[in-house]
Amino acid sequence: MTAPKLPEFDLTRFLPYRLAVAAEKLSEGLARRYRSEFGISVPEWRVLVHLAHSGNVSVRDIEARVAMEKSKVSRAATRLESAGYIAKEINESDRRLLQLSLTTKGRALMARLLPLAIAYQDEIAARLAETLEGFEAGLDRITGGKE
């Protein structure tokens, strides 16, 4: 039996692949910085930054927003709670849900972390230069628009 002929396919031009690689590179670039300076992981960063952005939210909310499995969000939240950066409380309207919020210590951490993230965003914007606006418009179309 002869193997079927494969269609022409250039993985290096396949947009889903390229976006995944670009996202991983960008994420790792920032992660190296906050990991070495603050000792936090990517899942912990995502929980913290989401709480800084949204205030008190549930693990389920974070899971949906940051595209991270519930178990990873839960483990990150447990580590952050142990470190004193976040507080967990039972949601009064749905007792099955835990509400997460930044503590004073967590807010102090984010006051130091967010300028790092803003500077990193500025570096990326500078690299994209005149293509930034079109790139952002394309990302908005792919992701369903701005929040």
Image (cartoon, rainbow, N blue to C red):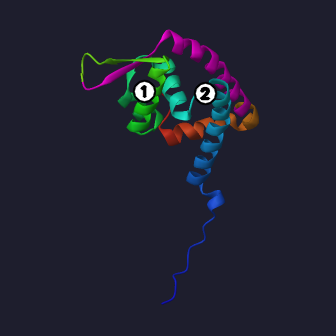
Q: Is residue 22 above or below residue 109?
A: below
Q: Which residues are magenta?
A: 96-124
Return the x and y of residue 128 as percentages of the image width and height: 72, 37
User: In this image, 40 relative to 68: left or right?
Assistant: right
Residue lying at 64% horizontally and 45% vertically, measured from the top left: 22
**What secondary structure is marked by label 1?**
helix
Tell me, for residue 39, which label it has, or none. Answer: 2
Q: Is residue 53 in the magenta section?
A: no
- Dot 2: within a 10 Å radius of its alpha carbon, few (fewer than 14), some, or many (20 or more) residues? few
Numbered label attached to residue 130: none
Q: Which callout, 1 or 2, points at the residue further toward the start of the chain? A: 2
Residue hosting label 1: 78
Nearer-the-camera pick, 113 or 129: 113
Q: Residue 54: image x %, image y %?
A: 46, 20
The picture places residue 59, in percent across and down from the top left corner, at: 38, 28
**Type of amino acid under label 2:** Gly
**Residue appearing at x 75%, y 36% in the figure:** 127
Q: Residue at x 56, y 32 (%)?
A: 41
* Labels 1 and 2 touching (C-beta < 8 A): no
Q: Amino acid at mark 1?
A: Thr
Label 2: which secondary element: loop
